[in-house]
Amino acid sequence: MVLAGGEGKRLLPLTLDRAKPAVPFGGHYRLIDFPLSNLVNGGYRKIVVLTQYKSHSLDVHISRTWRMSTFLGAYVTSVPAQMRRGQRWFLGSGDAVFQNLNLIDDERPDYVFVFGADHIYRIDPRQMLEQHVESGAGVSVAGIRLPHADCEQFGVIQPGTGTKIEAFLEKPAPADVAGLPDAPDQVLASMGNYVFTTGALVDLLHHDAGRDDSRHDLGGDLIPAMVASGDAHVYDYTTNRVPGQQEGSHYWRDVGTLDAYYDSHMDLVDDFPAFDLYNAEWPIYTLGRTMPPAKVVNDGRHGSSSVRRSLLSNGVVVSGSTVRGSVLSPGVRVLGGSSVEESILLDDVVVSSGARVRRCVLDKNVVVPEGAEIGFDPAHDAAHYTVSDSGIVTLAKGQKVVV
Protein backbone atom coordinates (compact mmCIF):
# COMPACT_ATOMS: atom_id res chain seq x y z
CA MET A 1 0.00 0.00 0.00
CA VAL A 2 1.32 3.42 -0.97
CA LEU A 3 -0.20 6.37 0.90
CA ALA A 4 -0.76 9.17 -1.61
CA GLY A 5 -3.58 11.22 -0.13
CA GLY A 6 -1.49 14.05 1.27
CA GLU A 7 -2.58 17.61 0.62
CA GLY A 8 0.97 19.01 0.55
CA LYS A 9 0.17 22.50 1.83
CA ARG A 10 3.84 23.30 2.42
CA LEU A 11 4.53 22.77 -1.29
CA LEU A 12 2.08 25.42 -2.44
CA PRO A 13 1.77 26.70 -5.14
CA LEU A 14 2.99 23.42 -6.74
CA THR A 15 0.04 21.62 -5.12
CA LEU A 16 -2.68 24.12 -6.04
CA ASP A 17 -4.33 21.66 -8.42
CA ARG A 18 -2.44 18.40 -7.93
CA ALA A 19 -1.76 15.96 -5.13
CA LYS A 20 1.70 16.13 -3.61
CA PRO A 21 2.78 12.72 -4.99
CA ALA A 22 1.91 13.97 -8.50
CA VAL A 23 4.36 16.90 -8.30
CA PRO A 24 6.98 16.60 -11.09
CA PHE A 25 10.54 15.88 -10.03
CA GLY A 26 13.92 15.55 -11.68
CA GLY A 27 12.88 16.52 -15.20
CA HIS A 28 10.32 13.97 -16.28
CA TYR A 29 9.48 11.96 -13.14
CA ARG A 30 6.77 12.46 -10.54
CA LEU A 31 7.30 11.91 -6.82
CA ILE A 32 5.11 8.79 -6.84
CA ASP A 33 7.53 7.10 -9.27
CA PHE A 34 10.21 6.68 -6.61
CA PRO A 35 8.39 4.47 -4.05
CA LEU A 36 6.66 2.55 -6.84
CA SER A 37 9.99 1.87 -8.55
CA ASN A 38 11.50 0.60 -5.29
CA LEU A 39 8.65 -1.85 -4.75
CA VAL A 40 8.57 -3.05 -8.35
CA ASN A 41 12.35 -3.44 -8.54
CA GLY A 42 12.12 -5.50 -5.35
CA GLY A 43 9.64 -7.86 -7.00
CA TYR A 44 6.48 -6.66 -5.21
CA ARG A 45 3.93 -6.10 -7.94
CA LYS A 46 0.54 -6.08 -6.27
CA ILE A 47 0.37 -2.44 -5.30
CA VAL A 48 -2.51 -0.14 -4.40
CA VAL A 49 -2.05 3.64 -4.23
CA LEU A 50 -4.50 5.22 -1.78
CA THR A 51 -5.51 8.66 -3.05
CA GLN A 52 -7.77 11.45 -1.83
CA TYR A 53 -6.72 15.06 -2.41
CA LYS A 54 -6.91 16.51 -5.97
CA SER A 55 -5.89 13.15 -7.35
CA HIS A 56 -6.85 13.45 -11.03
CA SER A 57 -3.36 14.01 -12.46
CA LEU A 58 -1.98 11.34 -10.12
CA ASP A 59 -4.65 8.83 -11.18
CA VAL A 60 -3.98 9.57 -14.85
CA HIS A 61 -0.21 9.16 -14.39
CA ILE A 62 -0.62 5.82 -12.61
CA SER A 63 -3.08 4.46 -15.17
CA ARG A 64 -0.89 5.42 -18.13
CA THR A 65 2.51 4.62 -16.65
CA TRP A 66 2.23 1.79 -14.18
CA ARG A 67 0.81 -1.06 -16.24
CA MET A 68 1.78 -4.49 -14.96
CA SER A 69 1.25 -7.89 -16.55
CA THR A 70 -2.26 -8.91 -15.51
CA PHE A 71 -1.53 -12.38 -16.91
CA LEU A 72 0.75 -12.90 -13.90
CA GLY A 73 -1.65 -11.21 -11.47
CA ALA A 74 0.45 -8.07 -11.08
CA TYR A 75 -1.04 -4.59 -10.82
CA VAL A 76 -0.50 -1.03 -9.69
CA THR A 77 -3.83 0.72 -9.23
CA SER A 78 -5.03 3.91 -7.58
CA VAL A 79 -7.81 3.56 -5.03
CA PRO A 80 -9.75 6.74 -4.21
CA ALA A 81 -11.38 7.40 -0.86
CA GLN A 82 -14.73 5.57 -0.94
CA MET A 83 -16.30 6.18 2.50
CA ARG A 84 -16.34 2.44 3.19
CA ARG A 85 -16.54 2.99 6.95
CA GLY A 86 -19.17 5.72 7.04
CA GLN A 87 -19.83 9.18 5.68
CA ARG A 88 -16.30 10.51 6.08
CA TRP A 89 -13.06 10.86 4.18
CA PHE A 90 -9.75 9.57 5.51
CA LEU A 91 -9.16 10.91 9.02
CA GLY A 92 -5.44 10.11 8.90
CA SER A 93 -2.92 7.76 7.34
CA GLY A 94 -3.96 4.91 9.64
CA ASP A 95 -7.62 5.44 8.83
CA ALA A 96 -6.77 5.36 5.11
CA VAL A 97 -5.45 1.82 5.56
CA PHE A 98 -8.37 0.89 7.83
CA GLN A 99 -10.93 2.02 5.26
CA ASN A 100 -9.26 -0.20 2.67
CA LEU A 101 -8.94 -3.41 4.67
CA ASN A 102 -11.10 -5.05 2.02
CA LEU A 103 -8.04 -4.93 -0.28
CA ILE A 104 -6.05 -6.92 2.25
CA ASP A 105 -8.93 -9.35 2.72
CA ASP A 106 -9.01 -9.92 -1.04
CA GLU A 107 -5.30 -10.73 -1.37
CA ARG A 108 -4.70 -12.38 2.03
CA PRO A 109 -0.98 -11.56 2.20
CA ASP A 110 1.24 -12.64 5.09
CA TYR A 111 2.91 -9.20 5.16
CA VAL A 112 1.95 -5.71 4.02
CA PHE A 113 4.30 -2.89 3.02
CA VAL A 114 2.92 0.58 3.76
CA PHE A 115 5.09 3.20 2.04
CA GLY A 116 4.78 6.96 1.77
CA ALA A 117 4.40 8.43 -1.71
CA ASP A 118 6.53 11.56 -1.67
CA HIS A 119 10.13 10.82 -0.69
CA ILE A 120 13.23 10.60 -2.89
CA TYR A 121 15.35 7.50 -2.21
CA ARG A 122 16.26 3.98 -3.24
CA ILE A 123 15.69 0.95 -1.04
CA ASP A 124 15.58 -2.77 -1.67
CA PRO A 125 12.42 -3.74 0.25
CA ARG A 126 13.31 -7.44 0.16
CA GLN A 127 16.05 -6.87 2.74
CA MET A 128 13.67 -4.95 4.99
CA LEU A 129 11.14 -7.79 4.84
CA GLU A 130 13.84 -10.38 5.54
CA GLN A 131 14.82 -8.67 8.81
CA HIS A 132 11.16 -8.20 9.71
CA VAL A 133 10.43 -11.91 9.35
CA GLU A 134 13.54 -12.90 11.31
CA SER A 135 12.69 -10.53 14.16
CA GLY A 136 9.11 -11.73 14.53
CA ALA A 137 7.97 -8.12 14.84
CA GLY A 138 4.45 -6.88 14.26
CA VAL A 139 5.85 -3.85 12.44
CA SER A 140 9.29 -2.80 11.24
CA VAL A 141 9.96 0.91 10.67
CA ALA A 142 12.68 2.03 8.28
CA GLY A 143 14.94 4.55 10.03
CA ILE A 144 17.68 6.93 8.91
CA ARG A 145 20.09 9.11 10.88
CA LEU A 146 19.39 12.82 10.58
CA PRO A 147 20.60 15.93 12.45
CA HIS A 148 19.17 16.31 15.97
CA ALA A 149 18.17 19.89 15.14
CA ASP A 150 15.73 18.60 12.48
CA CYS A 151 13.80 16.24 14.76
CA GLU A 152 10.67 18.45 14.78
CA GLN A 153 10.14 17.51 11.13
CA PHE A 154 10.03 13.73 11.59
CA GLY A 155 8.92 10.83 13.71
CA VAL A 156 11.90 10.04 15.96
CA ILE A 157 12.81 6.47 16.86
CA GLN A 158 14.56 5.78 20.15
CA PRO A 159 16.21 2.35 19.75
CA GLY A 160 16.08 -0.28 22.46
CA THR A 161 17.60 -3.74 22.76
CA GLY A 162 18.66 -5.21 19.42
CA THR A 163 16.32 -3.92 16.74
CA LYS A 164 13.45 -3.19 19.13
CA ILE A 165 12.08 0.34 19.35
CA GLU A 166 12.10 1.75 22.88
CA ALA A 167 10.02 4.85 22.07
CA PHE A 168 8.55 6.61 19.04
CA LEU A 169 8.02 10.37 19.22
CA GLU A 170 6.11 12.16 16.47
CA LYS A 171 7.88 15.43 15.57
CA PRO A 172 9.25 16.21 19.05
CA ALA A 173 10.95 19.46 20.03
CA PRO A 174 14.77 19.08 20.14
CA ALA A 175 14.74 19.69 23.90
CA ASP A 176 12.41 16.72 24.38
CA VAL A 177 14.56 14.05 22.76
CA ALA A 178 18.14 12.90 23.33
CA GLY A 179 20.58 12.21 20.54
CA LEU A 180 21.89 8.75 19.75
CA PRO A 181 24.38 7.29 22.26
CA ASP A 182 27.14 7.08 19.65
CA ALA A 183 26.17 10.36 17.94
CA PRO A 184 24.53 12.93 20.25
CA ASP A 185 24.07 15.35 17.33
CA GLN A 186 21.89 12.84 15.46
CA VAL A 187 18.53 11.14 15.84
CA LEU A 188 17.06 8.09 14.16
CA ALA A 189 14.15 9.37 12.04
CA SER A 190 11.33 7.38 10.52
CA MET A 191 11.41 7.29 6.72
CA GLY A 192 7.65 6.75 6.54
CA ASN A 193 8.14 3.17 5.29
CA TYR A 194 6.69 0.25 7.23
CA VAL A 195 6.27 -3.49 6.83
CA PHE A 196 3.54 -5.12 8.92
CA THR A 197 2.68 -8.67 9.74
CA THR A 198 -0.87 -8.78 8.43
CA GLY A 199 -2.56 -10.12 11.55
CA ALA A 200 -0.89 -7.49 13.74
CA LEU A 201 -1.88 -4.72 11.32
CA VAL A 202 -5.53 -5.75 11.14
CA ASP A 203 -5.84 -6.06 14.92
CA LEU A 204 -4.14 -2.70 15.41
CA LEU A 205 -6.39 -0.91 12.92
CA HIS A 206 -9.59 -2.26 14.49
CA HIS A 207 -8.40 -1.28 17.97
CA ASP A 208 -7.41 2.22 16.83
CA ALA A 209 -10.70 2.75 15.00
CA GLY A 210 -12.55 2.38 18.30
CA ARG A 211 -10.53 5.03 20.10
CA ASP A 212 -12.10 8.48 20.39
CA ASP A 213 -8.78 10.03 21.47
CA SER A 214 -6.86 8.87 18.37
CA ARG A 215 -6.00 10.95 15.32
CA HIS A 216 -5.83 7.65 13.42
CA ASP A 217 -2.34 8.49 12.18
CA LEU A 218 0.35 5.88 11.57
CA GLY A 219 3.23 7.86 13.05
CA GLY A 220 1.24 9.67 15.71
CA ASP A 221 -0.94 6.83 17.04
CA LEU A 222 -0.51 3.37 15.53
CA ILE A 223 3.26 2.98 15.69
CA PRO A 224 3.48 4.28 19.30
CA ALA A 225 0.79 1.75 20.24
CA MET A 226 2.88 -1.09 18.80
CA VAL A 227 5.98 0.27 20.52
CA ALA A 228 4.10 0.19 23.83
CA SER A 229 3.22 -3.48 23.26
CA GLY A 230 6.85 -4.34 22.43
CA ASP A 231 5.93 -5.33 18.89
CA ALA A 232 7.79 -2.64 16.92
CA HIS A 233 11.31 -2.94 15.51
CA VAL A 234 13.52 -0.59 13.49
CA TYR A 235 15.16 -1.38 10.17
CA ASP A 236 18.45 0.49 9.75
CA TYR A 237 18.40 1.99 6.25
CA THR A 238 22.20 2.16 6.16
CA THR A 239 22.35 -1.65 6.08
CA ASN A 240 20.38 -1.74 2.82
CA ARG A 241 22.35 -2.64 -0.28
CA VAL A 242 20.81 -1.55 -3.57
CA PRO A 243 22.21 -3.16 -6.75
CA GLY A 244 24.33 -0.73 -8.75
CA GLN A 245 24.58 1.75 -5.88
CA GLN A 246 27.91 2.84 -4.44
CA GLU A 247 28.71 1.47 -0.98
CA GLY A 248 27.64 3.85 1.78
CA SER A 249 25.34 5.88 -0.46
CA HIS A 250 22.01 6.06 1.35
CA TYR A 251 20.16 9.10 0.11
CA TRP A 252 16.68 9.93 1.44
CA ARG A 253 14.89 13.25 1.21
CA ASP A 254 11.47 14.34 2.37
CA VAL A 255 10.56 16.99 -0.22
CA GLY A 256 7.60 18.32 1.75
CA THR A 257 8.64 21.98 1.59
CA LEU A 258 9.67 24.25 -1.28
CA ASP A 259 13.18 24.53 0.12
CA ALA A 260 13.55 20.75 0.44
CA TYR A 261 12.13 20.29 -3.06
CA TYR A 262 14.60 22.82 -4.43
CA ASP A 263 17.59 21.47 -2.50
CA SER A 264 16.97 17.90 -3.65
CA HIS A 265 17.03 19.11 -7.27
CA MET A 266 20.31 20.88 -6.63
CA ASP A 267 21.62 17.54 -5.33
CA LEU A 268 20.87 16.05 -8.75
CA VAL A 269 23.01 18.54 -10.68
CA ASP A 270 26.13 18.25 -8.53
CA ASP A 271 29.24 17.02 -10.31
CA PHE A 272 29.06 13.93 -8.09
CA PRO A 273 25.35 13.78 -7.23
CA ALA A 274 24.25 12.42 -3.87
CA PHE A 275 21.37 10.72 -5.66
CA ASP A 276 22.24 9.06 -8.97
CA LEU A 277 19.40 8.94 -11.48
CA TYR A 278 21.57 6.86 -13.81
CA ASN A 279 21.67 3.57 -11.89
CA ALA A 280 20.56 1.12 -14.59
CA GLU A 281 20.47 -1.80 -12.13
CA TRP A 282 17.76 -0.13 -10.02
CA PRO A 283 16.01 2.28 -12.41
CA ILE A 284 13.38 4.85 -11.56
CA TYR A 285 10.50 4.19 -13.95
CA THR A 286 8.18 6.72 -15.50
CA LEU A 287 6.37 7.47 -18.75
CA GLY A 288 8.00 10.29 -20.66
CA ARG A 289 6.38 12.47 -23.28
CA THR A 290 7.16 11.52 -26.88
CA MET A 291 9.42 14.40 -27.85
CA PRO A 292 12.67 14.87 -29.77
CA PRO A 293 16.01 14.92 -27.94
CA ALA A 294 17.19 18.03 -26.12
CA LYS A 295 19.01 20.51 -28.34
CA VAL A 296 21.60 23.19 -27.57
CA VAL A 297 22.14 25.58 -30.49
CA ASN A 298 23.61 28.93 -31.41
CA ASP A 299 21.56 32.02 -32.03
CA GLY A 300 22.43 34.30 -34.95
CA ARG A 301 22.02 37.42 -32.84
CA HIS A 302 23.20 36.26 -29.41
CA GLY A 303 25.88 33.74 -30.36
CA SER A 304 26.57 30.37 -28.80
CA SER A 305 24.80 28.72 -25.88
CA SER A 306 26.48 27.67 -22.66
CA VAL A 307 25.10 24.85 -20.51
CA ARG A 308 26.86 23.63 -17.39
CA ARG A 309 25.97 21.24 -14.56
CA SER A 310 22.35 20.88 -15.62
CA LEU A 311 19.76 18.26 -16.55
CA LEU A 312 18.01 18.71 -19.90
CA SER A 313 14.90 16.62 -20.61
CA ASN A 314 13.46 15.59 -23.96
CA GLY A 315 12.16 18.45 -26.08
CA VAL A 316 14.29 21.12 -24.39
CA VAL A 317 15.77 23.78 -26.69
CA VAL A 318 18.49 26.11 -25.44
CA SER A 319 19.18 28.73 -28.08
CA GLY A 320 21.91 31.35 -27.73
CA SER A 321 21.49 31.46 -23.96
CA THR A 322 23.08 30.42 -20.67
CA VAL A 323 21.94 27.62 -18.33
CA ARG A 324 23.75 26.94 -15.05
CA GLY A 325 22.98 24.41 -12.30
CA SER A 326 19.38 23.90 -13.38
CA VAL A 327 16.83 21.19 -14.18
CA LEU A 328 14.85 21.72 -17.39
CA SER A 329 11.76 19.57 -17.87
CA PRO A 330 10.28 18.42 -21.20
CA GLY A 331 9.42 21.11 -23.72
CA VAL A 332 11.25 23.98 -22.00
CA ARG A 333 12.54 26.79 -24.23
CA VAL A 334 15.40 29.07 -23.19
CA LEU A 335 15.73 31.67 -25.94
CA GLY A 336 18.43 34.02 -27.21
CA GLY A 337 20.30 36.16 -24.72
CA SER A 338 18.46 34.81 -21.67
CA SER A 339 19.93 33.11 -18.61
CA VAL A 340 18.69 30.46 -16.19
CA GLU A 341 20.71 29.91 -13.00
CA GLU A 342 20.12 27.34 -10.25
CA SER A 343 16.46 26.94 -11.16
CA ILE A 344 13.85 24.25 -11.80
CA LEU A 345 11.69 24.76 -14.87
CA LEU A 346 8.74 22.38 -15.27
CA ASP A 347 7.13 21.34 -18.55
CA ASP A 348 6.79 23.84 -21.38
CA VAL A 349 8.16 26.86 -19.54
CA VAL A 350 9.43 29.55 -21.94
CA VAL A 351 12.20 31.96 -20.97
CA SER A 352 12.05 34.64 -23.65
CA SER A 353 14.94 36.58 -25.16
CA GLY A 354 16.90 38.68 -22.69
CA ALA A 355 15.03 37.37 -19.62
CA ARG A 356 16.85 36.27 -16.48
CA VAL A 357 15.77 33.60 -13.99
CA ARG A 358 17.71 32.81 -10.82
CA ARG A 359 16.93 30.46 -7.88
CA CYS A 360 13.37 29.84 -9.05
CA VAL A 361 10.86 27.06 -9.42
CA LEU A 362 8.56 27.74 -12.37
CA ASP A 363 5.60 25.40 -12.73
CA LYS A 364 4.26 24.26 -16.08
CA ASN A 365 3.46 26.71 -18.89
CA VAL A 366 4.93 29.80 -17.24
CA VAL A 367 6.15 32.29 -19.86
CA VAL A 368 8.86 34.72 -18.78
CA PRO A 369 8.53 37.75 -21.11
CA GLU A 370 11.40 39.40 -22.95
CA GLY A 371 13.73 41.24 -20.60
CA ALA A 372 11.88 40.16 -17.44
CA GLU A 373 13.78 39.17 -14.29
CA ILE A 374 12.74 36.75 -11.54
CA GLY A 375 14.90 36.10 -8.50
CA PHE A 376 16.83 39.37 -8.56
CA ASP A 377 14.58 41.84 -6.70
CA PRO A 378 13.45 40.35 -3.35
CA ALA A 379 10.85 43.05 -2.69
CA HIS A 380 9.24 42.68 -6.13
CA ASP A 381 9.28 38.87 -5.92
CA ALA A 382 7.72 38.83 -2.44
CA ALA A 383 4.95 41.15 -3.60
CA HIS A 384 3.91 39.03 -6.58
CA TYR A 385 5.08 35.43 -6.07
CA THR A 386 5.58 32.75 -3.42
CA VAL A 387 9.00 33.06 -1.78
CA SER A 388 10.34 30.33 0.53
CA ASP A 389 12.23 30.83 3.78
CA SER A 390 15.55 30.59 1.95
CA GLY A 391 14.46 32.92 -0.86
CA ILE A 392 13.41 30.44 -3.55
CA VAL A 393 10.86 32.13 -5.84
CA THR A 394 8.05 29.84 -7.00
CA LEU A 395 5.37 30.49 -9.63
CA ALA A 396 2.22 28.39 -10.00
CA LYS A 397 1.20 26.60 -13.16
CA GLY A 398 0.66 29.17 -15.93
CA GLN A 399 1.08 32.11 -13.52
CA LYS A 400 1.59 35.44 -15.22
CA VAL A 401 4.97 37.10 -14.73
CA VAL A 402 4.65 40.66 -13.44
CA VAL A 403 7.12 42.96 -15.19
Image: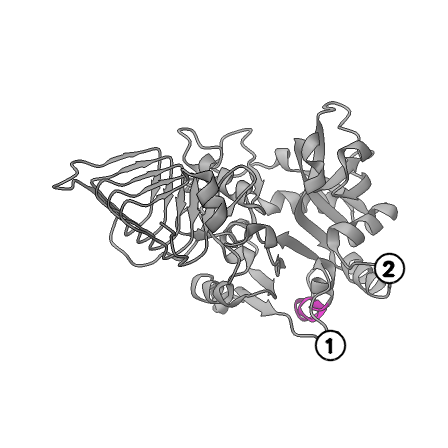
Answer with left or right where residue 239 lies relative to residue 398: right
Q: Amino acid at mark 2?
A: Asp
Q: Position of residue 65 (x, y in %)?
A: 44, 61
Secondary structure of the residue carrying tag 2 is loop
Q: Position of residue 374 (x, y in %)?
A: 39, 43
Q: Residues within 10 Å of mark 1 (few under 14, many from 20)?
A: few
Mark number, residue 172: none
Cα separation, mark 2 vs mark 1, equals: 19 Å
Secondary structure of the residue carrying tag 1 is loop
Residue range in magenta is 99-107
Answer with left or right where residue 127 lies relative to residue 303: right
The relative height of residue 355 versus residue 324 in the rendered view (above or below) is below
State the residue at coordinates (59%, 50%): 10
Answer with left or right where residue 127 lies relative to residue 393: right
Q: Amino acid at mark 1?
A: Gln
Q: Which residue is mark 2?
A: 213
State the residue at coordinates (51%, 49%): 34
Q: Which residue is mark 1?
A: 87
The relative height of residue 198 versus residue 294 in the rendered view (above or below) is below
The mark nearer the N terminus, 2 or 1, is 1
Q: Position of residue 273 (x, y in %)?
A: 45, 32
Looking at the image, which is closer to me, 100 or 153?
153
